[in-house]
Structure formats: structure tokens, C-alpha cells
Image (spheres, coloured by chain):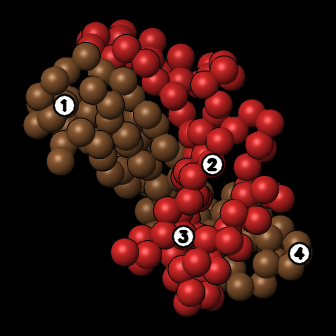
Chain colours: A red, B brown
Amino acid sequence: MQAIVNISLKDAVLDPQGRAISHSLTDLGFNEVTDVRVGKQILLEIDENDPARLRQRVARMCETLLSNTVIEDYSIVIPDEE
Amino acid sequence: MQAIVNISLKDAVLDPQGRAISHSLTDLGFNEVTDVRVGKQILLEIDENDPARLRQRVARMCETLLSNTVIEDYSIVIPDEE
């Protein structure tokens, strides 16, 4: 079963990569861009068929390895959950 | 209006970061993980109220700057589109 983890910097944390992209887009003529934030998206293929248990396991993976919870927020999407 | 761009390596492209995460998860006891791919998620705040036109503009941003289309695929999500 697939799980998707979206990791983004907390709002209070500066995002220099996002600012660089924002400036480059403006330089290229995309003046309508007002803010850019860059995060990670991790796609996991996991041998687990119960969505609830899958979500629990992935949350533990986020807490222990995938996300730096001091400066990052994470959200978990299980496409097969519906 | 917000637009989200998800960028992932094409399937044929090796993902060393994903492999490193996969090995680390296995070492930590998450033996059920069979595959990991790491991509980027870019959150754009854009001064544009028409979802169709927004998608068109963001696609052009992807082609010119955000994505390296030789080795990466991108998908655009407009949360307000529904």
C-alpha cells in the first residue's frame, strides 16, 4: 500500500530556497507570485494492508526519521484510504 | 490563490536519497517498507483568481524553472479548483 508524506517548514522558519525561487520567478516575468515555500514529498511503498495501521506506522517513521519536528510539519496521505 | 506543485524523479531515474531513507527505515525496524522515492513539494501563493488560468501559468513556471523535465515529472494541484 502506498503512503505519501508531505513535509513543510513551519511558518515561523525562514525558507531561503523558497525566496530564491520567488525572486527567479519574478525575474522571469511571473509577477503574480506572492509567496513560495519549498517542502519535501516522500512516497513510501509499504507491505501493510490495513490503512489505520499503515497511518500509525508512517507517523512513527516521521517522528523518528523522516521529519525534523522542531522546524518541520508533516502530513500523511493514504491514497487507498477512501 | 494557492497552487501546489509536486515534483518527482521519473521512474527510470535512480533515487539515492530514497534508497538511503529506505535503508535507514529498515535499520530502525520498519521492515515493511519496500520502496521510497523522494520528491519536492512547492507551495505557491499567486495573485490570480481564475483556476484555469492559474493552472496554465503554473505549468509554464514548471516548464521554465521549477522542474527539470529531463529527469523529473510534475503535477499541479489547485486546492480551490473543486
- Mark 4, Cα crowd under 10 Å, few <14 / some 14-19 / many 20+, is few
Considering depth in this image, is B29 or B22 the residue closer to the camera?
Answer: B29
Quadrant hosting residue B38: bottom right
Q: Position of residue A69 (x, y in %)?
A: 77, 43
Residue A74 image label: 2
Q: Chain of mark 4?
A: B
Instruction: Please give the chain letter of the residue carrying mark 3.
Output: A
At 56% from the left and 59% from the top, the residue drawn is: A76
For the residue pair A14 and B62, the one nearer the viewer reads as A14
Of labels 3 and 4, the one closer to you: 3
Q: Amino acid at mark 3?
A: Ala
Sequence order check, earlier mark of 4 and 1: 4
Q: Which residue is mark 4?
A: B27
Left or right side of A22 for A59: right
Pointers 1 and 2 in contact (C-beta within 8 Å): no
Quarter holding the N terminus of chain B is: top left
